[in-house]
Image (tube, grey):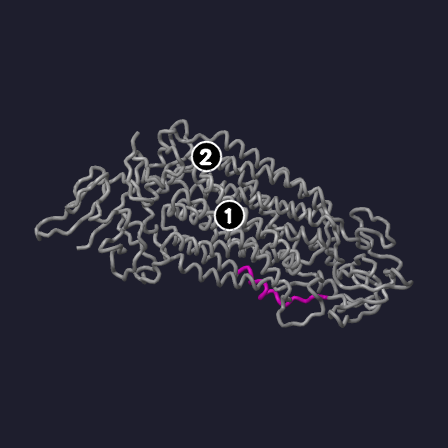
Amino acid sequence: MAMPQNSTGENGFCFTQTLDFSCPSSHPGEVGRTFDTRSGQEACGTPLSNGTPSSGAPSPSDSCAEPLCSTTPGEEGTQFGKGIKYVSDEGEVLACGWGRFTPGCLQVFNTSKGVLFFLCMASFLQGMTVNGFINTVITSIERRFDLRSYQSGLIASSYDIAACICLTFVSYFGGNGHKPRWLGWGVLIMGLGSLVFALPHFIAGPYEARSAAEVGICGGNQSLPCAQAASSLSSYRFIFMLGQFLHGMGATPLYTLGVTYLDENVKTNYSPVYIAVFYTAAILGPAAGYLVGGMFLTIYTEIGREVDISPENTLWVGAWWIGFLGAGAASFLISIPILGYPRRLPGSQRYIVMRVSEAHQLKDGSHNKASDPDFGKTVKDLPRSVLLLLKNPTFIFLCLAGATEATLIAGMSTFGPKYLESQFSLSASEAATFFGYLVVPAGGGGTFLGGFLVNKFKLRCSGIIRLCLLCTVTSLLAMFIFFIHCPNMPMAGVTQMYEGSALPDGHLNLTAACNAECGCLQETYSPVCGSDDIMYYSPCHAGCKKVSENLRNGKKVYHECSCIEKTLLPGPGDAEPGKCTSSCAKRPLLLCFMFVVILFTFLSSIPALTATLRCVSDRQRSFALGIQWIVVRTLGGIPGPIAFGSMIDKSCLLWQDQCGEQGSCYVYHNSAMSRYTLTAGLVYKVVGTTFFIVACLLYKPPPAESAPGRSDASENGNCDLQEQKPSLTAEVNI
């Protein structure tokens, strides 16, 4: 059917309801007249043509397009142009500020770009803290507080547990409430979680690293009694879990209400780009967290205390807690401007009017219930809202596909640095920095590119799902790179016998004839690299009898090591503290394909999110994102780190021994670690591909007559008159 069209240019749009413009009369007793845009009646004495005011009267669309002007406390509306005030249909002032304090200098930020900036800052901090700092310092926390990988995985999963508990409440009530206030308080709680996470450093007492020099070399080995050596530091994991729980509570509004707030306040075609920028900031956050966190790990955790061990030493614990203090303070600052934004931005009403539904069409037509303006405002509608989403097969399978991707992302982001640390024989800080360099271009670039492609090709819902399918298949093929792995660096008594023969898997033999008289203890792990390029458990286990300092680099050098043979001259060799450097020739190939896996995994994230927003009705978008995040976190985010941590524990060759109690893992079997990673990756990628295929096949778009023929119809001012939209009201000052 013919659609009435406004020809006011880019900002043109049509109205489905009457717009009332009161105007002053030249006669004191005359009441201002009104006009109806649908009938083209006279307004303020000026005739209308095609529903558009002539040049003598300001157009409502023009007033919506103008920037927000300054306002003073006590005014009832925000002024536009000459005497026009923009107010919402509830009479709410759409100015930026806190209560009655709405200074004019702040109104320059009261735009979609201003909101995007502050939300990007919040998502950047969230990503840097939760997915950056925590994943970077996980090895240091395990070492400092005697945690195992599955316990650190439980700490990581506490974030998702909190999100699952809060998502239904936040997305349902926040979706129909004041979104910026929910977002601001969420960022504030997230900052509190960062401070709680750093708390164990200040209440656990100083860290005492027992270096090889303190314990003694061959012939002088000393150890603390077991009653003193054993500790209950692992109980501090509950404080870490509380901090992560607060992180999860605070971040819940960010990726549900924040996304829909952006989507509601920009054009439909621009929405994927805005959301892509928002999520790109969330991806760059972890990258910055890896880089900055890796830098902090080069600083000793007890700042100001001199120690005789270097960051390469496995007993080294860096200043893991500094980043959390900074992130907490920054979160408090960012929450202040977010709390000042109005319920919706000035001029955003025209985007709501122009929006065309792409919601999945149910056979019984029950999807039309969500179009009711009063739907979703009370708790009574909650069961019906859930039922409508459960009856939407496209939405369900997109959620399941997202869960499979989230499992891999959560697992690899948590233990990715540990994987690189083991494969390439790196220190914890080097591995974190390396992983950061990998995530910055791959994760950030893939996220932004996904939103750009949707906008560039103006893809509709079915095309977006096919794009997700293509990305998933590509990353599935790249997963086969994990057939390749770097061999373990030879370690005497762990990967091979002291005389060089193979050692059966799972059997340790740290005692040999060359160190039998040294009295070495297994509780003291301080690996050294011998001049024969073989690693040893400690200087004592290498049979070293003397120690000196290298004047060039300040590192210790152990001499007269009876278990090490010189390569050229006969006699005992030397050793240096730390791991031997890996010269794995497969490193470039492995890193290249890991880049491809990360790139295409994140490339599908924004298209999948956009497809989720489009396959449900407008009034259910926030709640749909909340339900999706519950599914994603319950089936993916929570079990992901725990499952990966358990698998990595199975590939452990050398466990920490604390007087008979098993602690954290010192050395992993590289081939087993790659094999477990490959198995998990293939399984989840195949399942995810299947879910995207089913979602694409079951999607039923709206009938052709209710959707525009072109995807950019909103820019041409077309709208569906059958769909009820909120009214837009403007007033003219007398």
Expressed as whole percent of the image width and height from the top left, the position of residue 198 reads 56, 62
The label shown at residue 290 is none
Tally the numbered discs.
2
Element marked by disc 2: helix
Nearer the observer: mark 2 or 1; the answer is 1
From this view, report whether residue 153 is shown above or below residue 541. above
Expressed as whole percent of the image width and height from the top left, the position of residue 307 reads 69, 70
From this view, report whether residue 229 is shown above or below residue 700. below
From the viewer's side, name the closer residue of 182 and 551.
Answer: 551
Residue that mark 1 sits on:
448
Mark 2 touches mark 1? (CB < 8 Å): no
Q: Residues within 10 Å of mark 1 (few under 14, many from 20)?
A: many
Q: Amino acid at mark 2?
A: Leu
Magenta extent: 196-210
- Whether 197 is among the magenta residues is yes
Q: Is residue 529 left or right of residue 565?
A: left
Return the residue found at the far right.
570
Q: Amino acid at mark 1?
A: Phe
- In which quadrant of the rendered view does residue 181 lie? bottom left
Residue at left 36%, top 46%?
Answer: 176
Residue at left 66%, top 49%?
Answer: 591
Residue that mark 2 sits on:
390
Q: Is residue 627 visible?
A: no
Expressed as whole percent of the image width and height from the top left, the position of residue 623 reads 42, 42
Return the residue found at the far top.
363
Q: Is residue 505 left or right of residue 33?
A: right
